[in-house]
Image: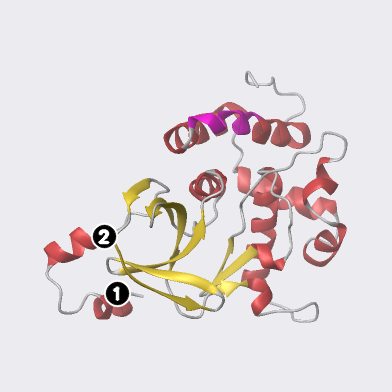
Amino acid sequence: MEVALIHKWAGHTMAEVKAAAVVWDGSHLGNLMISSWRYHRGHVVVQLGMEEAICNRFDSSISLIADELKPIFGLPKLGRHRGLWADREVILTRLETQEEDSLDCFIDETVMLDEALEEGVRRAYAFRWILGMPSNWTSSLWLRGNAIYSYREVRTSYDSDDPRGATLPQKCITRWFGEWSGVDRAIRMMLFGRQLAELRLQMDPIIRRLDPGQISWLNQILRRVQQRWYPSEQSCNL
């Protein structure tokens, strides 16, 4: 990785590197200075300074918030920004390599992954369940290098009658977890023993920074965690 970075910035001064740096923290960049764009693996890819990014239409702040919440649960984030391009609101997702793409482009129902990648898939799906993400298939995940990422994060869906079935299909559970106890194990590991109040303190500033209008989503996330892992803990003002 260090060699690749040195090659990437070769011939540029430190001032130029700093000026071109993109922090990928979900923030709004305003009017984007897009120097060029192209199609790559079915995605629109734009050049932003020294970086490249996949460009999608902005529908909601959910994908920005979800990406920034990932490190709280021990997951890598893709790196996203919001901005204006040709008077249209867009979301940028960082493109680090020319080989990365959604997981379904690399595997089918018969292909097995190594244990590290399989664990990454389980953690990504468990994270998506906590956040109420629907459409949990391999097309919702992203393969970058030797890591799995949650990718398609456009909307949430919480079904109070059957929250499990609402976001994790049985086919997904059977292949990657075996049974629901496997989902429970994955999420217990991601919680790192934290209580609801601590999770709230970590997530609340991120949501308020990116979109205060989505703060009710935090209550849904905590309620979902509580119902399975902390049934005796007080609701933490949900």
Q: Quadrant of the C terminus?
A: top right
Q: Is residue 96 left or right of residue 178?
A: left
Residue that sits furthest to the front in the current view? 87
Q: Is residue 218 left or right of residue 16?
A: right
**Residue type at the position of mark 2:** Ala
Q: Classify residue 162 by image quadrant.
A: top right
Query: Can you give x and y, in whole percent of width and height, for residue 18 in the image?
Result: 19, 60
**Residue 138 sits above or below residue 183 on the image:** below
Main secondary structure along the magenta-highlighted residues: helix
Magenta stretch containing residue 102, yes or no? no
Q: Closer to the camera: disc 1 or disc 2? A: 2
Q: Nearer the viewer, residue 98 or 59?
A: 59
**Residue 183: numbered disc:** none
Q: Which label's residue is closer to the chain start, 1 or 2?
A: 1
Q: Is residue 104 visible?
A: yes
Of the pair 104 and 83, the residue shown nearer to us: 83
* Element type where label 2 sits in the image: loop
Question: As rendered, which of 232 and 107 lies closer to the eye?
Answer: 107
Q: Amino acid at mark 1?
A: Leu
66 to the left or right of 36? right
Name the residue tied to disc 2: 21
Q: Which residue is mark 1?
A: 5
| In the image, residue 34 above or below residue 4 | above
